[in-house]
Amino acid sequence: MFVDTVVEDKALHKPAFLIGLSVTVLAIFFALNLTNTIFGEFLSPVIGNPEESGFFGRLAVSFVLTILFVGNLLLISFARLKIQILIVWIELFFLFLAFAYSFDLEIAYIFQNDFICSTESARAKLCTPSKIGLMISKGLFTTIYISAVSIAIATVIAIVGAVAKLSNNGFAYAISSFYTSLFRGLPLLLQIYLIYMGLPQLGFMIDAIPSGIAALSLCYGAYMTEIFRAGIQSIPKGQWEASRALGFKFGLILRKIILPQSIPIIVPPTGNQFIAMLKDSSLVSVLGIWELMFLAKKLGAKDFNHLEMLLTAAMIYWLLTIILEMIQARIESKYKQKT
Amino acid sequence: MANNIKAQTNSEASPIISLKGVSKWYDDFQALKNIDLEVKLKEKIVICGPSGSGKSTLIRCLNRLEAHQEGEIHITGIELHERMKDIDTVRQDIGMVFQSFNLFPHLTVLENCMAGPNWVRGIDEKEAKERAMALLKQVKIPEQADKYPEQLSGGQQQRVAIARSLCMQPKVMLFDEPTSALDPEMVSEVLDTMVELAKSGMTMICVTHEMGFAKQVADRIIFMDEGEIVEQNSPEEFFNNPQNDRTKAFLDQVLT
Ligand SMILES: Nc1ncnc2c1ncn2[C@@H]1O[C@H](COP(=O)(O)OP(=O)(O)OP(=O)(O)O)[C@@H](O)[C@H]1O
Ligand SMILES: [Mg+2]
């Protein structure tokens, strides 16, 4: 994107906009009526008992909140871009925490010893002192293992599939287009069931984890086939011709000339797929695989502390995604320099 | 002095390239019509003609970037046809320079030049590098070796492309309008390189409208129109005494 070199005044620094914003925010806070919350309590020295403060209390609370909100925006607007981004991130994160906090959770529950662990002493090896420990040592490990293997297999499938789709061999084209059509056409959950329960009907006994990996790699391989095909096609014909004219064979051209050049085009959508797959790996919990989602449900169910464990899983998934996003950004910036 | 660039053609016996009755169609459209042509070792041929006359098509048939449907093409004694097994070995011996350079943008200038010898001819990296540097010196840009193509001017890029082809030590060099994508002030640096190459005794087939270059270097000029070879002659005859009306019309246009 091209950022123009002529800078307009920041909207926040125009009085008209600022006043308009303040009035709107005030109206919203007033409508929400936060007098009976923690905010009202804070202001009780001024407004007295929040319950009895009436219109004045409601207005005062809204007013204070509006000042805080708009003042915060105004302060941030003076910071440098990087600082701005950081502050807004942190503030949004705390809002999210506050949202979670409002569920009235029993945070300590996450760190309690786990029942599964203490009774099934046969599983001593898995035994960790806390639920969160089990989530990480077993659940996180399994999730990463399943995702990483599936991502690797899907990438190989995608390269083969893309080449087949671009070839003028009838069989190759037919097989690969049938494959992408089928596996993009069925819900992933259904594919997982079909592979896990269908293959044994044919006499292939298949364990839960391999079925999960098979379903994930086949499904995401199909999406990535299309990404790779588009990436390969985006390289100008002249690159093929120059390579051919030098006597390069097909495989060499693909490996050394075409794929390296399509990486900058392939990486962003592929990163998206990796992130999506990481989270979709939670679907294999239906096969009883002890990955993050499965453990979150199992550990929370016994004492009806569902939300605690689900939120823990949520935070772990999010963290993993952030790591993937950072890796993706690195790769993108590395390849940007050259082309 | 211009004359000693040119090949003593009569001394070489069998032709390195020969075309007999070659025709090519794009769907219904016939782009080449019954082309006969023989090129001897060390001969320099310039092909010219109006846009769409089939010059690129002809030259691209010579390394089978395009397929012909009728007639025979022999390169260094090997016939080019649909079911041939060793097209890649033939192509290693035929260098090609494109109008749009077609350098590999993700490789440095040096790597562009090393790619062919190293990956295809199996020459080890050290030797490939020495050869590449020698040829970059020959085209007068050794100091750009570690840059990427996009950091070079058009003229420099085209000279790298020439060096990249020469690194394969080809027997024939094909040029398809190598200077027509260049700004005027860069044309001469590329033409100079090509004249040097001609002096070294390379067999060359050049599609170009640079008539000065043609006069200086060509043993034969071929004029094409509508997929046919209309006229071919030595530069002197071609410019001073054109036979065909279409040639005259074309020359009137290019030379004014
Ligand atoms: N891939 C193609 N498919 C269909 N027709 C083509 C194709 N390539 C070339 N042609 C046609 O073949 C004819 C000869 O094309 P060619 O590129 O060989 O001309 P040229 O003499 O090189 O012209 P120019 O000077 O513009 O490069 C043209 O009429 C062109 O439209
Ligand atoms: Mg052309």
Image (spheres, rainbow, N blue to C red):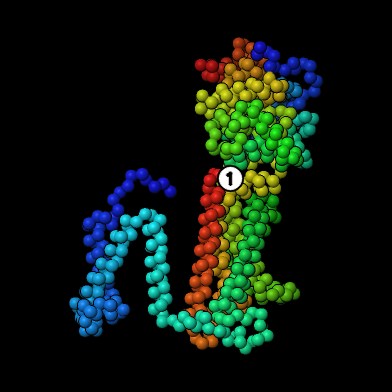
The residue that mark 1 highlights is A235
Name the image quarter holding residue B117.
top right
Camera-nearest residue between A112 and A258: A112
Expressed as whole percent of the image width and height from the top left, the position of residue B184 reads 51, 24
Residue at 37% x, 54% y is A80
Point out residue A240 in the picture as x, y percentages from the top left corner: 64, 41
Report x, y in % for residue A225: 61, 57
Extreme residue toward the bottom, this view: A119
Look at the picture and state if B110 lies above or below A279: above
Q: Residue at x 71, y 40 (%)?
A: B125
Furthest residue in direction left, as rendered:
A56
Residue type, mark 1 in image: Ile
User: SS at mark 1?
Assistant: loop
Task: Please give the name of the residue rendered at 60% of the width and 80% of the height, measured from the top-left corner.
Answer: A128
Quarter assignment of residue A51 = bottom left
Which x, y percent locates residue A327?
55, 58
Left or right: residue A175 versus residue A73 is: right
Image quadrant where one finds the C terminus of chain A: top right
Residue B221 against residue B122 in the figure, above or below: above
Dot 1 alpha-carbon crowd within 10 angstroms: few under 14, some 14 to 19, many 20 or more: some
Q: Do we see residue A33 in this rendering?
A: yes
Q: For this rendering, which residue is in front, A127 or B103? A: A127
Chain ID of residue with mark 1? A
Q: Quadrant of residue A140?
A: bottom right
